[in-house]
Image (tube, coloured by chain):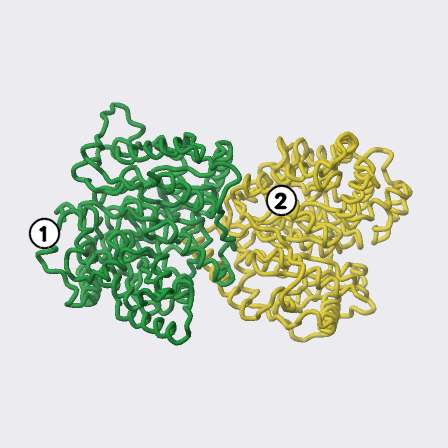
Chain colours: A green, B yellow
């Protein structure tokens, strides 16, 4: 890892406590699954092939970990594989992955195997599965509580053992899920990278790059196939960013559709912009599998803050989908690989004749991004400083950046009301604009580039703009990877903004080689079912020979 | 009117402007519809029979104004009556009513007749109605804009002529509605009474009592049959309170189900507790008529803040409805007529065997009410004082009461976050509690008494508690009226609270004679369809011989 990287550090007391939690976690790695030092030291930038090559996994384990969640549920139900075999395979691979990209915060494979054994026995005895996710291993982001497991809200001061499942994990458990690992998130859970007291998570495709964040542990783990599906959260891109950086699938549903009751957070009551939770996975159909089953359990009857949405994904459309293509947001031009992939997708979609393709011009994304940045920390970050000072935890630069003026300030009730009014007016104006375009969905970049070098992810607007609007979004792989011989920066003398210039300066094709190139598809608020259906139509066209 | 009543007043400049707007309104009353001075001066406390007895309405007009909205739509569609006849009848009756109870702020019957004429001609020409509300006259609360008509957000400083319809009124217009009057609301729109720069609205059943508020102009007008259906708003009881006081029907839907885009307000961005808009009318089926048709126009596609609820009122239930009966909220015991009517309803429901009846104990309504009071004015009422000072408008005592400490203060971001957290925790705890009771709906008082004497409505909790929870509620008439010979106060030495004692002191059966006794039925958040269906089941039982 480069010497220039900023490590999580703090006072001696902080360092002592961090040492203890890291030791706790390291001790969870069985000796039999430790990678030889030379494998780690000599690892290439792209570490995704090491789980298969390291010799620690059997052929059957490797085969199981290639499956998506839908296949796993089907195969367990068909008795082709057992729940124990499944969680063992993913657990072993997760532990291998962790040693390469530092993606886990808590490892409890024994607990997972024990639960899987119960499920296998139940199936044997009763002749039926306990639920539609019977035996499915699911990885869980650190701040999402699982009974008896470690959790935190992004600061050492908030580390605790959860007394109970949250509603999401109890729901998944009831559906048959098996838990075995929890995954890393950044300090404050408010970076589009993943660096915390548990250390920094690396991008599996190129460890000199970030896996994104804040659900970066999930993204890296799933890309390493140490998990086929996991639970992330997103208030500015925290599902979609890491999904994009690691080349997997991720959906941020409209807020208040999936349950977050019981999730740890440190700004309860700060509701100027709402988070959302959703799946990160390795196929589009797994998004549907996850949401469909969680909603079938009627979480809105338990979490009264939820909107009782009807999950009914259309399988056909009355008329051709109208797909807007937004190449850039008029503020920051994405890096060459993104523009290349989007141009190719646009051409292919248009040529297919199966959808209507139009250019989509952004509507004042600069303004929307300014507003949401200010909404994130209505107290100007006071609470962040308080939490850090409680344990002597040092503020990481990306934390400092996100709470700093001019984008944040300590508001009073009057200025907050003005800010929220500005938000509402923006939402109204945006909605009017979108309606005018007639688009069903918009295909756009998830980030102004592929995975960026560590400690540089400061332009969130490609995802955060949809958070302020609360429009659901799915990120999915384009299939392309950054290719230095093709993805050459064109020389420009005019820049769209200072942020545009900074973004261009970050681009070094050779250093970023191999980074997955991803797309983001968005739909209007609460049009989550339409979005899922449209993503399938579009991906089918893009994948067609 | 008693000499003790507080009149809206202010600086000489204020008085001059108020004089002008009142003169504008008074000039809208045609000479032919002016009631003789002696009729007004000699009016009994109960003025509801004067429209029929005054001689200004024909038999047909009187018959039309007896109809509910559903009947009117049917009869116009069946060509039994015309749109012109209909709006003329209601308009004339509204103007008569206004002279007795001061319920209108803008009168434009000519405009209504002209629109009705267009509709009649369209029907004649095209052979079909323009929409399901073809020709239906609808009255509109002052702060709900209608293009070209007067509107205000509850202060003289906010009086304006609306440049456009809001989404609700444009939707209703497209459905075929005819507008002809706007109705009074109190200063600040935050009293459960109705006293403004347009003067005080009186309760038609007993003019020494308040019609409630803030949609008190609507309630009084509809009780006088000067309208069959109107649009109100409710953030603490402003639909349900006046519906109860005037003995009509009113529903506060879950927030963000019906469109409020474009409504005037003076605290945009203060979203700690959300308002809702809904119908006030003279039959339960009219609630369904209104909401069903507004939602069929898909307002959530235009007002992006809305939740796209599916309107599908069940016509049968898998098992018997479980109806909780809450006689009081453990803080303030309602006056005798409310307790009498509720006890009778409970007995009749139980005896019917058609529903399951259980006692419903309130869950910390005291706490919930404290929280919502603080949420109403997060700046401690600064904005109210600012708006008043702009025109020299004097603060009315009920305005002062609602913005006063200890219930409000000027918050900063940190204390606001704490307050909103308290709100969310209360909502969660309440939901858990409700679920535990297993109730589908709860039947309870809408107010701790029938309509109270003017200037005394300070205990909002019977309605406001459901606002903080965002549980939908329907108020409907019990059929009973306050009867001094039956509704005798039992002597008590122990009171539930200071508010309880104050409430008891307000009770003077002989002075409150004739006040309608109403019920409130509530359901869980977003269970609006269940609520509408349950209300029908319950009312059918209560009305059965």
Location of residue A452 with respect to A9 vertically, above or below: above
Disc 1, SS: loop
Q: Which residue is mark 2?
A: B296
- The answer for how far apart the CA atoms under marks 1 and 2 are is 64 Å
Location of residue B377 with respect to A365 vertically, above or below: below
Crowd class of label 1 (few under 14; some 14 to 19; many from 20; radius 10 Å): few
Disc 2, SS: helix
**Residue drawn 19% across the image and 40% down it:** A513
Location of residue A204 with respect to A126 vertically, above or below: above
Q: What is the x, y in percent for residue B243? A: 71, 54
**Residue drawn 45% across the image and 33% down it:** A356
Disc on res. A42: 1
Image-based side of A198 in relation to A364, left or right? left
* Residue B221 appears in view: no
Location of residue B84 with respect to A242 vertically, above or below: above
**Residue drawn 73% across the image and 39% down it:** B134
């Amino acid at each position: 890892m480069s010497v220039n990287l900023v490590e999580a550090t703090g006072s001696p007391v902080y360092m002592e406590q961090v040492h203890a939690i890291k030791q706790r976690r390291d001790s969870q790695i069985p000796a039999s699954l430790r990678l030889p030092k030379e494998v780690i030291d000599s690892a290439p930038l792209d570490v995704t092939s090491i789980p298969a090559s390291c010799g620690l996994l059997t052929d059957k384990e490797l085969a199981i970990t290639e499956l998506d969640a839908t296949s796993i549920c089907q195969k367990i139900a068909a008795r082709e594989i057992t729940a124990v075999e499944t969680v063992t395979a993913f657990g072993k691979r997760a532990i291998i992955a962790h040693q390469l990209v530092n993606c886990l915060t808590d490892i409890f494979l024994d607990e997972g195997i024990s639960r899987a054994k119960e499920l296998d026995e139940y199936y044997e005895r009763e002749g039926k599965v306990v639920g539609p996710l019977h035996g499915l291993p699911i990885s869980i982001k650190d701040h999402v509580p699982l009974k008896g497991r470690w959790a935190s809200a992004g600061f050492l001061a908030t580390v605790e053992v959860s007394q109970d499942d949250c509603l999401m994990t109890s729901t998944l458990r009831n559906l048959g899920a098996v838990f075995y690992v929890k995954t890393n998130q950044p300090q404050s859970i408010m970076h589009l990278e993943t660096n915390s007291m548990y250390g920094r998570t690396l991008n599996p495709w190129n460890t000199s790059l970030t896996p994104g964040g804040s659900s970066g542990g999930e993204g890296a783990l799933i890309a390493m196939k140490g998990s086929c599906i996991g639970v992330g959260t997103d208030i500015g891109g925290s599902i979609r960013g890491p999904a994009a950086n690691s080349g997997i699938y991720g959906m941020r549903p409209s807020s208040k559709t999936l349950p977050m009751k019981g999730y740890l957070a440190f700004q309860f009551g700060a509701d100027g912009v709402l988070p959302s939770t959703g799946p990160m996975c390795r196929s589009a159909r797994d998004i549907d599998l996850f949401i469909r089953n969680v909603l079938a359990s009627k979480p809105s009857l338990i979490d009264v803050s939820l909107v009782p949405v009807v999950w009914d994904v259309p399988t056909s459309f009355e008329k051709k989908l109208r797909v807007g293509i937004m190449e850039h947001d008029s503020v920051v031009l994405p890096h060459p690989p993104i523009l290349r992939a989007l141009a190719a997708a646009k051409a292919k979609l248009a040529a297919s004749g199966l959808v209507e393709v139009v250019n989509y011009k952004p509507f004042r994304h600069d303004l929307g991004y300014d507003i949401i940045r200010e909404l994130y920390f209505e107290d100007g970050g006071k609470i962040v400083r308080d939490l850090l000072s409680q344990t002597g935890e040092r503020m990481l630069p990306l934390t400092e950046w996100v709470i700093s003026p001019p984008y944040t300030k300590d508001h009073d009730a009057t200025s907050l009301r003005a800010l929220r009014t500005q938000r509402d007016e923006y939402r109204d104006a945006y909605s009017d604009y979108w309606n005018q375009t007639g688009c069903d969905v918009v295909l756009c970049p998830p980030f102004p580039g592929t995975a960026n070098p560590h400690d540089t992810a400061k332009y969130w607007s490609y995802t955060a703009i949809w958070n302020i609007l609360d429009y659901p979004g799915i990120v999915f792989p384009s299939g392309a990877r950054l290719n230095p011989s093709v993805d050459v920066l064109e020389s420009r003398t005019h820049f769209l903004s200072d942020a545009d210039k900074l973004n261009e300066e970050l681009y070094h094709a050779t250093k970023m080689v191999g980074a997955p190139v991803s797309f983001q598809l968005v739909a209007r608020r609460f049009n989550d079912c339409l979005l899922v259906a449209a993503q399938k139509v579009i991906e089918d066209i893009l994948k067609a020979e």
